[in-house]
Image: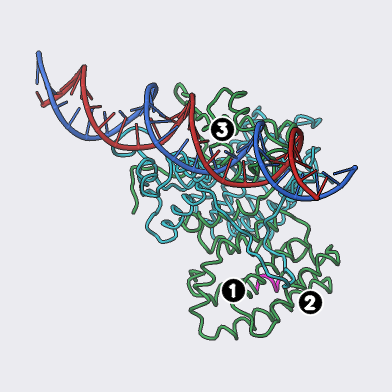
Chain colours: A green, B cyan, C red, D blue
DNA sequence: TCAGATTAATGGTCTGACCTCATGAAGGCC
DNA sequence: GGCCTTCATGAGGTCAGACCATTAATCTGA
């Protein structure tokens, strides 16, 4: 399954290299599509391109940059997968490629893949989730507005529906936690929280299916949800954070295979 | 700069839709390259492909999946940009495309772009960093081994070098914080911490250049670094966390433009 | 035996073609 | 005049095929 000859993880910030010898520069011949990405990124950094702005048509861009359309397309595909760009066919208004802002899906796929490859352990991801959601709970209890809390309550009510399916419950559960992050007013918290939950969706399902009394577990989780919401509504920030952490750790401990412990 | 006709952020988890009417499904015609990505992802999820394993040659994969090589390449480019795959030309051993595990660069580019597009505010990112590094500090103080701490100390020593350039200091600074996250033993913490720092690299530089007494600021930051390291080494987890948070908030407050406050 | 030349396999790039689709203008009908 | 149909246009989506650069494996000959 593994091959020692293929080094992996050559990036990473650290690495204090002992200064000695002629110090050859590491070549770094960027591929054509990387250059195209850089060109687009440059415009974004310079502020010439913002969300909603159109990019030149693929053929035009290829001509302007002096590369083939294939290379332009590879670059745009990457940017598309990063949620930075959105393309649609047709003609006239709305046709073409535009700068967009859709980080969630990209983040989700990224985490899903790297969790599957065990670059990130589920425990690591869960720990990250705990820290983010603790902060979300604190901020939500401190500064949340009514609209944001209404969304949280909507998801809470959804999960209170009797006879709800596991799938519906899980999706509302995710939406509940994301809504709290949203109420905290931190977009990165919110997107990361959603991405983590969504990337573990399948694992959660298969894990849940091995639980003896699913209804009892769902009821217990929902009771914890209510407790968290109470604390947030009452403005008891620390309590909300503690309950959130307890809730996530409890869920992880009850779902076999989701946690190593 | 913006165009109302282009809706943005159509993803996101939540959204309890009022059930009424015929409920049309949202079409979802996936493009060819998405299908190729799905095919690869499926193999990964099924465990048939792990880190280091080779993928079929592009031409073979195209034939097997019944698509053009261009579509395969677009998919592989996306996976490459996600750090999931690594390609090299040539022939024989080591040539071809392999499953890899290089999430850092991908995370960095993702954050850099979305911060530039103001999808994530610098404050949001900083807040995320604080929470992650607080946890890292606590875990590092609790369970760090000597090797990991040695790396932290190496970076600390680097920053103690007299007459060090701003660039060198900043890079060692980043490496210092990443090393602590590494010592905490959480890969996601570590990669996120590095990505956040690296994605803000340019902003930090331009911000630092507007500081009056750079040497004094660097000295102050370095003093805080020593304080954090002392607390970690002594196993005083909570103190390490508090000092870390204070350190980051201090830096953000002293670097104009990096923070809105 | 070993150095050098050859070959084969692979990714990297480019070209040009064709398809689908949404728009918007032209034209025809009422 | 106003509405509908038709169609040309231009955008992305896909494909087939060619050629290049690089590299390992193989062959060849001294």
Q: State the residue at coordinates (86%, 67%).
A: A146
| Residue situated in front as seen by the camera: B98 or B237 | B98
**Residue B220 appears in the picture as rendered:** no
Rendered view: A113 above or below A255: above
- Tell whether label 3 touches label 2 (CB within 8 Å): no
Chain of the residue under the numbered disc 2 shown in the image:
A
Give the distance between the C-alpha atoms of the residues marked 1 and 2, in whole angstroms: 25 Å
Q: Quadrant of the N terminus of chain B?
A: top right
Tell us which disc is closer to us: 2 or 3. 3
Chain of the residue under the numbered disc 3 shown in the image:
A
Disc 1 crowd, CA 10 A, few/some/many (<14, 14-19, 20+): few
Q: Which of the two discs, 1 and 2, labels the residue nearer the N terminus? A: 1
- The residue where tag 3 is placed is A72
Q: Are marks 2 and 3 on the same chain?
A: yes
Residue A115 percent across, percent down from the top left: 50, 58
- Element carrying mark 3: helix
Bounds of the magenta segment: A242-246
Disc 2 crowd, CA 10 A, few/some/many (<14, 14-19, 20+): some
Q: State the residue at coordinates (64%, 70%).
A: A171
Q: State the residue at coordinates (65%, 68%).
A: A174
Disc 3 crowd, CA 10 A, few/some/many (<14, 14-19, 20+): many
- The residue where tag 1 is placed is A167
Tell us which disc is closer to us: 3 or 1. 3
- The residue where tag 2 is placed is A230
């Amino acid at each position: 399954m593994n091959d020692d000859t293929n080094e992996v993880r050559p990036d990473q910030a650290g690495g204090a290299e002992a200064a000695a010898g002629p110090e050859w520069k590491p070549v770094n011949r960027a591929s054509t599509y990387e250059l195209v990405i850089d060109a687009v990124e440059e415009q974004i950094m310079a502020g010439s391109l913002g969300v909603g702005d159109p990019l030149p048509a693929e053929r035009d861009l290829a001509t302007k940059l002096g590369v083939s359309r294939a290379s332009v397309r590879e670059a745009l595909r990457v940017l598309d997968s990063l949620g930075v760009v959105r393309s649609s066919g047709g003609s006239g208004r709305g046709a073409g490629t535009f700068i967009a802002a859709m980080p969630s899906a990209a983040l989700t796929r990224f985490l899903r893949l790297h969790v599957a490859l065990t670059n990130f352990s589920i425990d690591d991801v869960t720990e990250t989730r705990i820290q983010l959601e603790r902060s979300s709970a604190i901020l939500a209890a401190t500064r949340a507005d009514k609209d944001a809390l209404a969304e949280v309550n909507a998801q809470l009510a959804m999960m209170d529906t009797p006879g709800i399916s596991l799938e519906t419950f899980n999706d509302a559960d995710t939406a509940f936690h994301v809504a709290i992050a949203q109420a905290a007013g931190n977009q990165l918290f919110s997107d990361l929280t959603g991405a983590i939950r969504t990337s573990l969706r399948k694992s959660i399902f298969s894990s849940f299916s091995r639980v003896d009394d699913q209804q009892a577990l769902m009821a217990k989780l929902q009771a914890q949800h209510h407790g968290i919401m109470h604390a947030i509504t009452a403005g008891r920030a620390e309590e909300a954070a503690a309950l959130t952490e307890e809730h996530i750790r409890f869920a992880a401990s009850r779902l076999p295979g989701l946690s190593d412990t």
